[in-house]
Amino acid sequence: MDIGRLGLWQGGTWAEFRKPEVLAELEELGIGAVWLGGSPPADLKIPERLLSTSSKLVVATGIVNVWDAPPEVAAASYARLSAYSDRLILGIGAGHRSMVGDAYTKPYEKLVSYLDGLDAGGVPVAGRALAALGPKVLRLAADRTAGAHPYLVTPEHTAQAREILGSDTLLMPEQKVVLSTDPDTARALARKRLHTYLTLPNYTNNWLRLGFTDDDLAGGGSDRLVDSMVAWGDEDAIRTRIEAHRAAGADHVALQVLNRDKLGALRKLAPALT
């Protein structure tokens, strides 16, 4: 599957980008894949709409939460879209304890059993990816999926992930960006988006492993943390961050544009990044 070197990550219903002419423009801009963030439903109806109204774009879920629906549902949805199997990636992940509740026990074992269910349902290894931050889940992604989709990471994490994954597994990190050279404006947008993640242990523990401190996590995040998680500046500054991920071993980088005019920012960024 050719997902290209650059993707677009967007949460919600994708209403802003769902029009066929906009999807065609994304293809012309060099976007190889669109990532549906925010735990899209396992019925895959949003991917189906995007696949049916585009011609080349790969559509990936980033991610279907394994606690939201059994693997049989996700597998049946994937089978329903078999005509698009060369452009569909079923990304799955374990989500967060605070959003799942008491059912959130033994998340690693849950991922393993979910992958077993996808095997039984006929979802090919080449058609699935795994949200992965720590070494154990990265190794699982290498063993049982086509690729890893780390979220909220640095190029240093990308280098560590590549070493764990080896050379045969796709590495597709997400990277938040703000096209603005004003530090106050850019960091305000970044902090607004990072606020929730500062309360989620999956991410905070990973940041601590990367060398950040409790002080970096306090007060809405230090400038060091914010600048590491969100690339901001002009086209050259953002290209530098994307190239750092690529140099560290990323096959594909999924941009999450935080500017209010996302499509307008992407029109300016894409030529510099592709």
Image (cartoon, rainbow, N blue to C red):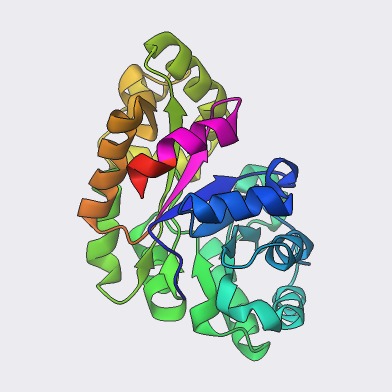
| Residue 262 is a magenta residue | yes
Residue 70 percent across, percent down from the top left: 74, 72
Residue 256 percent across, percent down from the top left: 51, 40
Left/right placement of residue 169 relative to residue 72 reads left
Residue in front for this viewpoint, 137 or 48 = 48
Left/right placement of residue 22 relative to residue 48 reads left
Residue at 62 percent across and 67 percent down: it is 55
Residue at 65 percent across and 61 percent down: it is 64
Is residue 18 something that shows in the picture?
yes
Point out the stretch of residues depicted in magenta: 253-269
Q: Is residue 47 above or below residue 75?
A: above
Total marks shown come to 0
Is residue 219 something that shows in the picture?
no
Q: Is residue 38 above or below residue 177?
A: below
Q: Is residue 93 above or below residue 17?
A: below
Left/right placement of residue 90 relative to residue 174 reads right
Q: Quadrant of residue 117?
A: bottom right
Left/right placement of residue 80 relative to residue 240 reads right
